[in-house]
Each structure stands twice: as structure tokens, then as C-alpha cells.
Amino acid sequence: MTPMKLCRFVVAHDTVVRPGILEGSVVRDLSAAGIRSVSDLLESPDLGGVLRGMAGAGLPELELPEVRLMAPVDRQEVWAAGVTYLRSKKARMEESDFSATAYDRVYEAPRPEIFFKSMPRKVSGPGGPVGIRADAKWNVPEPELALVFNSSMRLVGYTVGNDMSSRDIEGENLLYLPQAKMYRASCALGPVIRVLADEAEARTWTIGVSIRRGAGVVFSGETSVGQIKRTFDELAGWLGRSQEFPDGAILLTGTGVVPPNDFTLAADDRVSIHVSGIGTLVNDVVVV
Ligand code: DO4
Ligand code: MG
């Protein structure tokens, strides 16, 4: 079966954001079938059946160059888990002085690190900017698989995420984490939501990042989703504790690719994050 991918898009010279299905280079306009938003669609108890029904529904079709893809979230809050890969634990311990043991402990503890990352309207989409703080000196992208949950905390899809981070601010003092993680254009998601794939399949996917500066690649790296220490159910269970998400939620699952410690992003760098089962999210770096 061809992988099923949902998107949000606008047609050139239009401002209306529409939900769509992306198949190859063709976008099918789901708004023509009365579907108002991706998060509404993700509430369906039989998403597979609904989407299969759309295949023969004669929906308007557009070629990718005719549309602009938007971040595939409309009303969902965006949260993030951290220190879920051994590589991230090591990097965090290297960058911090007196808080190193906190990372060591959280990697082993039953309760994971989970933090709020972004309101949906602040998320950058494909081709949008990703920010580095003007007051930070050590900035990196964090390429991450993002889990997509509906309002019942059912895992309904996956997208590609970038949890942009200021390592010097986070390393100086653990209490500065919100400033290292939450600022203008610090979160990017896209290009699509891959649906109808279970955790076993997602764990076979690879996550790669490549950073271009001018004509050259200044960093590239790859890991496997299978390297995540915790199961998706475990992460979902902790995220949903004493919480409610009436519009669903996104959970970034942590980074397993960290550039060397002498690397920092610069304005105009192009960050491409590829997850093999989903697609590639491309964003250019701006100073904010
Ligand atoms: O506490 C630091 C955040 C770690 C993180 O965002 C990650 O591991 O991806
Ligand atoms: Mg992260």
C-alpha cells in the first residue's frame, strides 16, 4: 500500500488553508469533501476507511508546485520529550556543568523529561524560517520524529520536527531551559503527517539531518528511530497524565543526532531533516 500522507496547503494567491492528501506530487483537496481541518479528520474512528473512500471521490487535484505546504498542525499544542537517546544524554552532560547529573538521572528514570514547545500558530512549516536567538552563541537543530495524537491520545500519525535549541543557554543553568527551547521560530514541523503506520514500522525509519552553508554541507548525521529508549505508548502515557488535549497534541520524541561541540548554526544555513517513512522538512536559519 502506498504510504498515506496528510497535509495542509494554500493555493497560490489564496489565503485559505485547506487539508489535503499528498500522493507522489499530487495534492487532493479534502476541503471539497467537507473536511475542514486535519485535526478534525484525525478524530475519525476509522481514518483508513475515510481516506480510502476519498480515493475514488473525484476530489480536485493540484500539482505540488501549484501549492504552498503549511505546517501540518492547526489547533494541536506542541510538546517535546528530551534525553530519550543515549546520544542526547551524552551531549547534555557535556554542555552543562553542575546540572549534568540531572540528564543522567532522567535518562534512567521512569518519568521522562517532557516540556511544552510551541503553540500551533507559532510553528514554522516547510520552507519557513527557523530561528537562532540573537543572545545565544551555540545553536543547533534537533531533528526529531514527532508523534501526532488526537483528542483521545490515540497515536494517529507522525511528522518531522525540528526542536531548535540554544545549547549555551540550556547548559548554563537547567532553569534556563524554556529560554533555550521556546522563542520565535524555534519549532518547525512538516511537510506532511504520515498516517496508518504502527510503532513497529516507525521504529524501522531513519532520521537524517543535513546543514548546508553556501555551496557546502557543514554537518550531516543520521540515526534510527529504533534507538529511542522509550516506547511511544510510554511517552504518550506520561504526556497525557493529568492533562487534556481537546484538539489533540504533537509530541517531539527527542534528538539522537547532535553536531560536534564546536558546531553552531549561522544565519542563512539551510537545515534539511529527513525521516525515511515521512519526507523531508527544509528550513532556512534566521537570527531572531
Ligand atoms: O533537556 C534538554 C532537552 C533535550 C532535548 O530536547 C532532546 O533530547 O531532544
Ligand atoms: Mg529535543
Image (tube, rainbow, N blue to C red):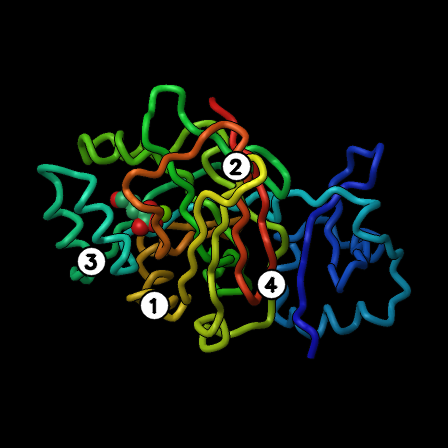
* Secondary structure beneath label 3: helix
Which tag, 1 or 4, sits closer to the chain's start? 4
Question: In the rendering, at what x and y percent does residue 95 appear?
Answer: 20, 40
Identify the residue position indicated by label 1 in the image.
227
Which of the two labelled residues, at mark 2 and mark 1, occupies the earlier sequence position? 2
On the image, the x and y values in percent for residue 183 come to 42, 28
CA gap, disc 4 to disc 2? 29 Å
Secondary-structure class at tag 4: strand
> Residue at image x 70%, y 45%?
69
Q: CA distance from mark 3 to mark 1?
A: 13 Å
User: Which residue position is annotated with label 4?
Assistant: 194
Q: Nearer the viewer, residue 260 or 254?
A: 260
Q: Which picture quadrant has residue 45?
A: bottom right
The nearer-to-camera label among 3 and 1 is 1
Asked if the beta carbon under badge 1 is closer than 8 A to the nearest atom of ligand 1, the reply is no
**For disc 2, does the CB lie below 8 Å from ligand 2?**
no
The amino acid sitting under disc 4 is Arg
Q: Which residue is mark 2?
A: 213
How many numbered tags mark residues here?
Answer: 4
For the point 28% across and 42% down, the residue is 261
Q: Is residue 236 above or below residue 203?
A: above
Dots 3, 1 in contact, CB < 8 A: no
| Depth order, front residue of 150/97 | 97
Residue 96 sits above or below residue 274 on the image: above
What is the CA distance from the residue labelled 1 to the residue labelled 4? 20 Å
Point out the tag, 2 or 3, that comes first from the N-terminus. Answer: 3
Q: Quadrant of residue 41?
A: bottom right
Q: Label for residue 107?
A: 3
Whole-percent x, y for residue 215 in the image: 58, 39
Q: Secondary structure at mark 2?
A: strand
Q: Secondary structure at mark 1?
A: helix
